[in-house]
Amino acid sequence: MTNTAVYAGTFDPVTSGHIDLVMRTAKMFDKVILAVADNPDKKPLFNLEERIELARTVLVDTNNVEVMGFSGLLIDFVRSVDARIVLRGLRAVSDFEFEFQLASMNRRLDSDIETVFLTPSERYTFVSASLVKEIARYGGDVSEFVDPVVHQALKDKYKAS
């Protein structure tokens, strides 16, 4: 059994903060799966296929990272890829309550699956996909917070709308 961690989220879009966590996690585990959630309730800017493609492009040179889409319960996806670790990022104390509740529920659904919390590098603690989208929507420069490919995708998306 490989030591596999699943880092799940909507990644709408994938940010430098997300990539930071993926790269650091890739040093700790044999395999990391960036699991892009199909969560229509969040009304994402990019559809699932676009979010998967952006993440794959950004992570193309990372050998032990795989990008996959999923829908449904995270715990079912984790089981389906034979993983035992869920990675969750904590940017601020305000994230902890929700993440703690989610981890507790996941442990209740499957006690063999553990949740590991990781904080981003200090330079990314304030970066969120929501803030990046809001800045990009109004023509602000988000190049510091996303890969150039994602930056261009945001420009293209907001030109079209």
Image: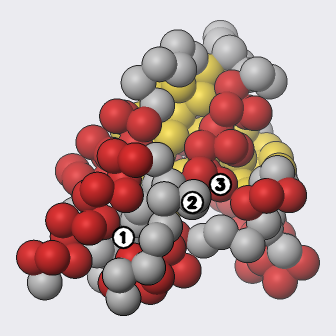
Q: Are marks 2 and 3 in contact (CB under 8 Å)?
A: yes
Choose between 100 and 144: the one closer to the eye: 144
Choose between 50 and 140: the one closer to the eye: 140
**1 relative to 101, above or below:** above
The numbered mark at residue 39 is: 1
Quarter location, residue 4: top right
Q: Is residue 30 left or right of residue 152?
A: right
**145 relative to 55, above or below:** below
Choose between 8 and 71: the one closer to the eye: 8
| Front of the two marks 3 and 1 | 3
Q: How is the image coloured?
A: secondary structure
Q: Amino acid at mark 2?
A: Phe
Label 2 SS = loop
- First in sequence, mark 2 or 1: give its number: 1
The numbered mark at residue 145 is: 2
Residue under the image location 27 percent in, 42 percent down: 53
Residue under the image location 82 percent in, 51 percent down: 121
Q: Amino acid at mark 1?
A: Asn
Q: Quadrant of the N terminus?
A: top right
Distance from disc 2 to disc 3, alpha carbons, whole Å, reads: 7 Å
